[in-house]
Image (cartoon, rainbow, N blue to C red):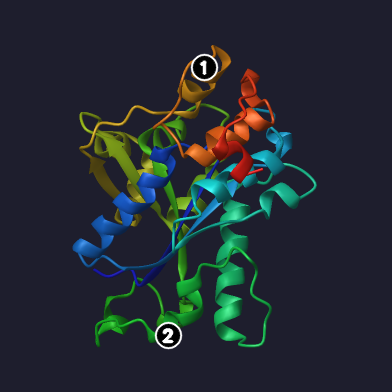
Amino acid sequence: MSQGKIVLMACGSFSPPTFMHLRMFEIARDYIHSLGIGTIVGGIVSPVHDAYGKKELVAAQHRIAMLKLALRSSGWIKVSEWETQQSGWTRTKVSMQYHQDTINKCLSELNSDAPAWLPDDVLNVNSIDEPDDLAAKLNGNVEDGVTVKLLCGADLLESFATPGLWAEEDIEAIVGRHGLVVVSRAGSDPGKFIYESDALYKHRKNVLLMTNYITNEVSSTVIRRLLRRGESAKYLTDDGVLAYIRQYRLYGALPCVTEAAARYS
């Protein structure tokens, strides 16, 4: 069953962004398009507010700059600064609803100002071909427009079971109103976790599961550790990101004057 036009949205620290953060978007888009589940019309990366207070979370201005460097070759994924511009930390369900409402407002009101994070294809969404019987295949009404779905790994899915971490009404809104697109590692079993969770099982048709069979254990934690120890993190993230980190001495990295650092300064 087609779920219509979809924007994938990833929320998190991105301190720093890794290639795996971005590969998830490509894996999910390929999977959804190959099975005809829906039409991906854009991707959004939404870094968390500084008030989130996670260990080694550098200032939002740096995380945004690094994300833009990492995504400069992407033609469909944009960085949203909205969460970082709020007065404090924003709940994921609130951020997702804001972005979905804003996207559909831009589609319904042609004269409305489009925010910088709006994916390019969203502006041309009405020209994207869909099956003639799309109206019969959509979960809701065609007039519902674009749906923003949360793109995540299996670890975030499993965090729903951590006591006190997620409010029940938040899980209900995220999974029931928007939906999850989960990219898991080979060998993990997110389907079992969904089966064991009443909240997730209730909306299991709104959770898309896909497996990444190309092993990639790169994480922000690994990159920070290497930089802190003065070791190479090359090929784990974009060269521009590494040059930026060294230029501003983030994560304890030692400064290194290189051609790349000068280019992205």
Q: Is residue 101 left or right of residue 28?
A: right
| Identity of the residue furthest to the top in this view | 229
Q: In which quarter of the image is residue 230?
A: top right
Q: Mark 2 points at which residue?
A: 126
Q: Residue at x 39, y 51 (%)?
A: 180
Q: Name the residue under label 1.
A: 225
Q: In which quarter of the image is residue 41?
A: bottom left
Residue 72's place in the image compared with 21, above or below, is below
Residue 134's place in the image compared with 172, above or below, is below
Locate residue 183, reporting x and y percent.
Answer: 32, 43
The quarter of the image holding the C terminus is: top right
Q: Which residue is drawn at 57% across and 32% down?
A: 258
Q: Residue 204 carries which label?
A: none
Mark closer to the observer (1, 2): 1
Q: What residue type is labelled 2?
A: Asn
The quarter of the image holding the N terminus is: bottom left
Front one among 53 and 26: 26
Identify the secondary structure beneath mark 2. Answer: helix
Q: Residues within 10 Å of mark 1 (few under 14, many from 20)?
A: some
Q: Is residue 253 left or right of residue 19?
A: right
Q: Is residue 120 left or right of residue 264?
A: left
Front one among 255 and 33: 255
Locate residue 50, reporting x and y percent.
Answer: 72, 37
